Image (spheres, helix red, strand yellow):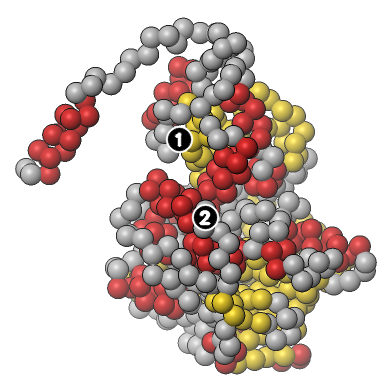
């Protein structure tokens, strides 16, 4: 089932028992952030949370933890709620291979019901804002799709970027936006500033669930997120034209903000409790001027809690980080079997691969670090053999325990780029990166004594099925 808007997905979560409506009156702070923080501790079937009785707000409707479990992630893709994560990744890969699926342009988007322009623009009037963590420097929009175009090639549909970036609310019509240098919006902004121009942007809040997944996915610069959304949905993604900027925005959004990133203007933004489980300090960041707000009647405000992993963000970007890194590696190295990059936004990844010759696994690990995602995030790569499941951590730990000789299997590469939010980088944005080769050496690398591995007994498979049947029939 493909969802065209945010509300239809909430209805499905409700019918599947994956939406918890909190009807009692709560305080915006600390209750909303604390509840979302707690929901992440409920495990792989954690529900989304819906609040409509919040002290200090009139008619506020707030949804949290919408993607915050593997059950909800599966339902977002139209899959059974109990599908194991490894199978979800496999289905993600299958659908990825149907890319591109052109979007469907529609008229009369629901977000066009109401409009505020010019001096009437007031983010506080439309959005029930609150801090997620007590050390946050202000209110944040952290689950919105930000749309921008390449100023040098504005007609190239694939170069129109849809990404999720954190934005601090700094006034009635003003945001601070953090454009990570490795992300497409930073490239768009640099091109605009080179010619002394602002960068037009549209910001869509409360989107259909696949659009949010795709906006969080590291894709090639000229690959369209809307065309990828169609592949993952199994149906064309519905889009509409934003009236002020002319940008393509999700048809089913709750709220659409339009304006510009003001060229060559920077102000302090932050701190913010980040996906690393640490606060990122105040930094000089771009300024967004909002010139128009379009919104549905009684809009639902969606926010995403970030903090000590795992939280909703880890479920949201887990599969959507594994799959593009896998696809990019697989194109050049067919030997690659699987990629698990689910840990802390892919700062660490585990890659299983066959090997052509000695040293091959290390070469694959180095290539992983130069993928679009790897440039800014992958700072540790663990390489394992093709018979080790990178999603099975006991198997990975076995490989680390028995295959690694620090004398030759640890590759430390100094002074490489990483996202500035990595608290271990020094200076911010620079780090050493590490490859751990936990694969079995092959010729001409003849180190170690690996010629007599213990294999499963031939009868073990039949006994596994027999014992499972006996347990099921008890």
Closer to the camera, 249 or 313?
A: 249
Residue occupying the point 66% across, 59% down: 223
Q: How crowded is mark 2: few (under 14 residues within 10 Å), some or many (20 or more)?
A: some
Q: In this view, does 134 lie above or below 463?
A: below
Q: Give the mark toward the camera: 1 or 2.
A: 2
Residue occupying the point 42% across, 38% down: 391
Q: In which quarter of the image is the C terminus?
A: top left
Q: In this view, does 383 lie above or below 120?
A: above
Q: Residues within 10 Å of mark 1 (few under 14, many from 20)?
A: many
Q: Residue 96 carries which label?
A: 2
| Residue corresponding to mark 1 | 390
Location of residue 151 in the rendering, given as x and y in whole percent from the top left corner: 82, 68
Q: In this view, does 134 lie to the left or right of 244?
A: left
Q: Residue 402 carries which label?
A: none
Secondary structure found at label 2: helix
Location of residue 107 in the rendering, given as x and y in whole percent from the top left corner: 58, 88
Q: Is residue 97 left or right of residue 433?
A: left
Location of residue 184 in the rendering, given as x and y in whole percent from the top left corner: 73, 58
Residue occupying the point 33% across, 53% down: 83
Does the CB distance between marks 1 and 2 fall below 8 Å?
Answer: no
Closer to the camera, 220 or 334?
A: 334
Tell me, yes or no, if residue 156 can be seen here: yes
Which residue reaches farthest left?
474
Location of residue 123 in the rendering, given as x and y in whole percent from the top left corner: 65, 81
Q: Is residue 464 above or below residue 260?
A: above
Residue occupying the point 73% across, 51% down: 182
Closer to the camera, 341 or 65?
A: 341
Tell me which numbered mark, 1 or 2, is placed earlier along the sequence. Answer: 2
Q: Quadrant of the N terminus?
A: bottom left
Would you identify the image quadrant in which residue 412 lies?
top right
Residue at mark 1 to residue at mark 2: CA–CA distance: 20 Å
């Amino acid at each position: 089932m493909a969802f065209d808007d945010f509300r239809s997905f909430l209805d499905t979560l409700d019918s599947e028992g994956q939406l918890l409506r909190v009807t009692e009156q709560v305080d915006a702070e600390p209750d909303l952030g604390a509840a979302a923080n707690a929901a992440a501790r409920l495990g792989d079937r954690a529900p989304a949370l819906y609040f409509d009785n919040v002290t200090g707000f009139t008619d506020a409707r707030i949804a949290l933890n919408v993607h915050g479990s593997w059950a909800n992630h599966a339902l977002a893709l139209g899959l059974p709620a109990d599908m194991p994560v490894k199978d979800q990744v496999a289905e993600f890969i299958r659908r990825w291979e149907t890319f591109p699926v052109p979007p469907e342009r529609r008229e009369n988007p629901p977000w066009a019901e109401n409009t505020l322009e010019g001096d009437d623009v007031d983010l506080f009037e439309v959005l029930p804002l609150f801090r997620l963590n007590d050390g946050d420097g202000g209110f944040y929009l952290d689950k919105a799709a930000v749309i921008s175009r390449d100023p040098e090639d504005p007609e190239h549909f694939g170069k129109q970027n849809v990404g999720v970036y954190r934005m601090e609310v700094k006034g009635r019509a003003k945001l601070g936006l953090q454009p990570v240098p490795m992300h497409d919006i930073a490239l768009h902004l640099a091109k605009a500033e080179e010619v002394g121009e602002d960068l037009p942007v549209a910001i869509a809040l409360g989107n259909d669930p696949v659009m949010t997944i795709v906006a969080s996915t590291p894709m090639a610069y000229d690959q369209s997120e809307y065309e990828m959304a169609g592949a993952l949905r199994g149906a064309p993604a519905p889009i509409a034209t934003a009236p002020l900027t002319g940008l393509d925005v999700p048809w089913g959004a709750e709220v659409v903000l339009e304006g510009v990133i003001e060229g060559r203007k920077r102000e302090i933004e932050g701190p913010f409790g980040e996906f690393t489980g640490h606060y990122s300090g105040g930094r000089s960041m771009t300024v967004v001027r909002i010139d128009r707000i379009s919104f549905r009647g009684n809009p639902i405000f969606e926010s995403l809690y970030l903090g000590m992993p795992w939280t909703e963000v880890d479920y949201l970007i887990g599969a959507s980080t594994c799959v593009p890194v896998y696809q990019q590696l697989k194109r050049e190295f067919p030997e690659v079997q699987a990629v698990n990059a689910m840990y802390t936004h892919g700062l660490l990844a585990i890659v299983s691969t066959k090997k052509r010759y000695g040293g091959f696994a290390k070469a694959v690990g180095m290539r992983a670090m130069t993928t679009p995602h790897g440039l800014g995030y992958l700072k540790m790569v663990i390489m394992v053999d093709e018979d080790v499941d990178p999603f099975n951590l006991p198997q990975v730990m076995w490989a680390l325990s028995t295959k690694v000789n620090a004398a030759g299997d640890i590759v430390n590469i100094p002074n490489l780029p990483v996202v500035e939010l990595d608290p271990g980088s020094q200076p911010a944005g620079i780090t050493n990166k590490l490859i751990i080769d936990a694969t079995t050496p092959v010729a001409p690398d003849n180190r170690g004594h690996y010629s007599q591995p213990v294999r499963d007994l031939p009868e073990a498979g039949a006994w596994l099925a027999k014992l499972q049947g006996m347990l099921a029939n008890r």
